[in-house]
Each structure stands twice: as C-alpha cells, then as structure tokens.
Amino acid sequence: MYLGIDLGTSSVKAMLIDAEQTVVGSASSKEVKTARPQAGWSEQDPADWIRATEEAIAGLRAAHPAAFAVVRGIGLSGHMHGATLLDAEDKVLRPCIMWNDTRSHREAAALDADPRFRRITGNIVFPGFTAPKLAWVKNNEPDVFAKIRWVLLPKDFLRVWLTGEHMSEMSDSAGTSWLDTGGRKWSGELLAATGLEERHMPALVEGTDVAGILRPELAARWGLDTGVVVAGGAGDNAASACGMGTVREGAAFVSLGTSGVLFAANASYLPNPESAVHAFCHALPGTWHQMGVILSATDALNWHSRVTSASAADLTEELGDMLKAPSGVTFLPYLSGERTPHNDAAIRGAFLGLGHESGRAVLTQAVLEGVSFAIRDSLEALKSAGTALTRVTAIGGGSRSRYWLKSIATALNLPVDLPADGDFGAAFGAARLGLVAATGADPVAVCSAPATAETIEPEAALTAAYEDAYQRYRRLYPAVRAAY
C-alpha cells in the first residue's frame, strides 16, 4: 500500500492506494484554522498541521487497519509558498505566513525590480511567494530573522516531523523565488539578495525520489514496518497534475478550489514572466509546467454564501442547469488581490452594474461568471507565453456545479472534460509519487490520465454574449484600480 498526505489550506487529507492504484480509502482532518490578524495577512500554526495529519491518519487506520499496516511508501503534497521558519533545534519561530498573505507586496516589488529574479526564476516575484515574506520578516521582525536556521515550505515541515530530514523537491521550491528553475537548483545569488545562504534551505530532490525514511517511533506508533520511504512529493498543483495524469506536453486542467488554477504541462522550460504566468518545475524529472493562478475561486462563492446566509449548493441550484446569458452585472473576484494577469495585491473585488432588479440569483450568476472570466484571463496569459490549449479537465470542489462548468467552457470556448468517478486530486497524486519512490516504477506510466466520463462543450448560442461580457470584465479592472 502507498499513502498520500495532502496538507490543504483548510484540512489534511490522507489517502491509501494499492499497487494497482486503486483507492482503498481516504480520511480528512478537522478544519485547520487560519488567522488574519491584519488586513491582507494570513497565518497558520504549523503545530496544527501535525495535529491534523495525526487526525487524518487515525481515521484512515481505523477504517482500513490491515491495508494501512502494509504501507511501503508515502508521498507528500501541500499548499505552496508558505514561510515556515525554524531555529537550530527545529522549533517554529513564528506562525507560517501563508500563500494568500499579501503583507510583503512592497518587498516583492523591490525584489522584482532586480532583474536577476525574473531571469533566474522565470517568474515575477509575487507577494505570495516565499522570498518577499523573508524580506518582510527581516525588515519587521529582525529578532526572528536572526534565529532562522531553516526556511521550509509547509509540506516539508511535515517531512521533518515524519523523517527528521530537511529536504524539498523542485515543484514546490520553484514557488519560492529562490530557485534556478531551468537548472533545478537553488540560486545562491538570489538567496543572498534576501540575506540568506544555501545552508538555510533544504536539500533538493525530484518529486519521485526518496527524501527520507519514516522515523522508527512513528512507524511503531502507526503499526508499520521500519524502512517506509517518504517521496520528495510535490506542491499541491503539481501533485494534482500527477493525480490527473497531466504530465505530458499539452495536457491541462482547471482547478476550482479555494484558489483557481489553469495548469498546463510542458516538456521544456518556457518562462514568460511578463505574462504573470507561473513557469515552475513539475514533480517528474526533466519536466516543467505553466499555470495561471487566481486567488479566489470557490473562495469567492463561499464569501457570497456567508454574506447571503445561503449554502453554496443552494445558491448554485437556484440558477438551474441551463446556462444563462450574462445579465449585465459583473463581479470582479479580487477579494484577496490577484496574481494572473495583474500581479496586484492591493486590488479588491466589486459588483458593478447593479440595479433594483438584481436579486440573489443574479449576484450568484455574476460571481460564477467573474471566476470564469478570471480563468479566461489565465488562458490568454498562457497563450502569450506560448502555450495553446485545445481542452481542459476540471477538478476541485467547484467542479461539482454543472452550471459553473458550462460557464467556464463557454468563457474559455474550450471543451471541459470530467474524469470518471474517483478522487484524482493532490492526495492521489502524492500517493502515486510515494509508489514511484518505493518501487522505482516509471513515473509517466504511473501518472496516467483517468477515463473521461463526460465532456461539457461551450454553449455555442452564448459564446458571443460571453465574449462581450468578458471584454466588459477586462475593461473594469483599470477603472476599479484607479480607485485604489
């Protein structure tokens, strides 16, 4: 058996698969709390990640004791970019500054003005990335900065707890602004620009490599044999790509999770930072990927749900199954700023075009369309970076809404494939990487794509109306930005 552990923003999920990659079972933890002590801040206590992982493992062991007892490999996945700072005794120095924290926007702009960062990393230095967060800590918490021995990404903090090893892999590390992404190695030059050295960073391996052995005391507590290997693993989006089989040139998925991602696999390194597309290493050796990222996808619908005191499911059900033409009300989903294509931490969301007739259903429709148009922005950015897509596969919690999928297909003017029943997300991808590390199997063969259960085509009768609404959406960003 092989175990995948996915450290999500809101919970930890653990999944067991067998040697044929059949899902034996999965379990999730209770919610992991996020603190927002100031506007634009987002922090979590790394101790909560360990608690949540223990909860998920306990649930999995209780449901599948015999299968869990023969685990041979573990893969890790986790939310990216988080600054997890440890001292020389591996004690956490402060809460982790999360991926959606924008406090370091000034530091990010200063680093991005240094041409070495885009040249070496192939990416804009976004406020959510790790390097500007360390610059912020250096500027605002010098006592903490002086004690730093290790800078770890969230899943790699779990690795220390699991194995005692300070190690990371290429896909997650590419989101720090310190990686030579083409060369797949740390850049001492960029680390020095933030007052750090390579000794502060974990050793690097590929996501399919062994990156530690489960500590004997944990193995004994969980009823496992000694020698269980822990794979390098992947950042959450690359892990999802491994789960979806999005590892070959031209394959792509759209993820509707807390954030939204349009992800395309590449056989070569294709940076184009001016487009605000992320060009990162993939979890498989010798491969890369590009992705456009929006910061609020299902997060936007969940916000609307809280404001209206109606569940997200009830809100989307109210729209029915038949896609409607845009109403003229436009929603900009910039609740936490935006990455692709604007790289704007200060921008905030807005409804525009409201009238007395604009009821709850109209606002819900506008929220779904706004996220669809934000994903269309990412599609246009990918095109400018040299990647043309012919279809995408939908994953994530938002993909349960057929109305939303029809909206996305029509906004992108691309067919959207739905995978056959099954869970092919980050935990499954992590388990696949654990299998490869433990067995030496061919990673491309292991990371195959699931069968397609259904394809949702663009609504031809509404593509022109959607195009008009998208162009209106595009015009509104600079108008709203001027207000800030």
Image (cartoon, grey):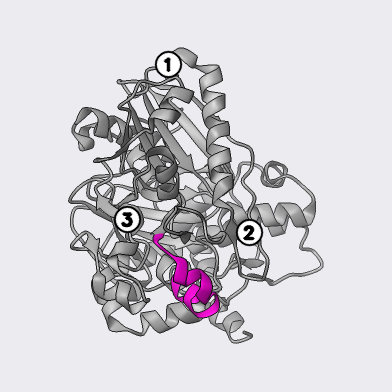
Q: Amino acid at mark 2?
A: Val
Q: Quadrant of residue 418?
A: top left
Q: Amino acid at mark 3?
A: Pro
Residue located 76% across and 63% down the image: 358
Residue 122 marker: none
Disc 2 designates what residue?
367
Q: For mark 1, give the secondary structure.
A: helix
Q: Earlier in the sequence, mark 1 or mark 3?
A: 1
Q: Magenta part of the protein: which range?
A: 133-150
Q: For mark 3, give the secondary structure.
A: loop
Mark 3: few, some, or many residues within 10 Å (few <14, many ≥20)? some
Disc 3 designates what residue?
202
Q: Nearer the viewer, residue 311 or 162?
A: 162
Residue located 26% across and 44% down the image: 247
Residue 484 position, x and y percent, is 62, 84
- Residue 253 against residue 112 in the figure, above or below: above
Residue 146 position, x and y percent, is 45, 72
Q: Nearer the viewer, residue 236 or 38?
A: 38
Disc 1 designates what residue?
67
Q: Nearer the viewer, residue 103 or 443?
A: 103
- Residue 223 against residue 262 in the figure, above or below: above
Q: Nearer the viewer, residue 311 or 138?
A: 138
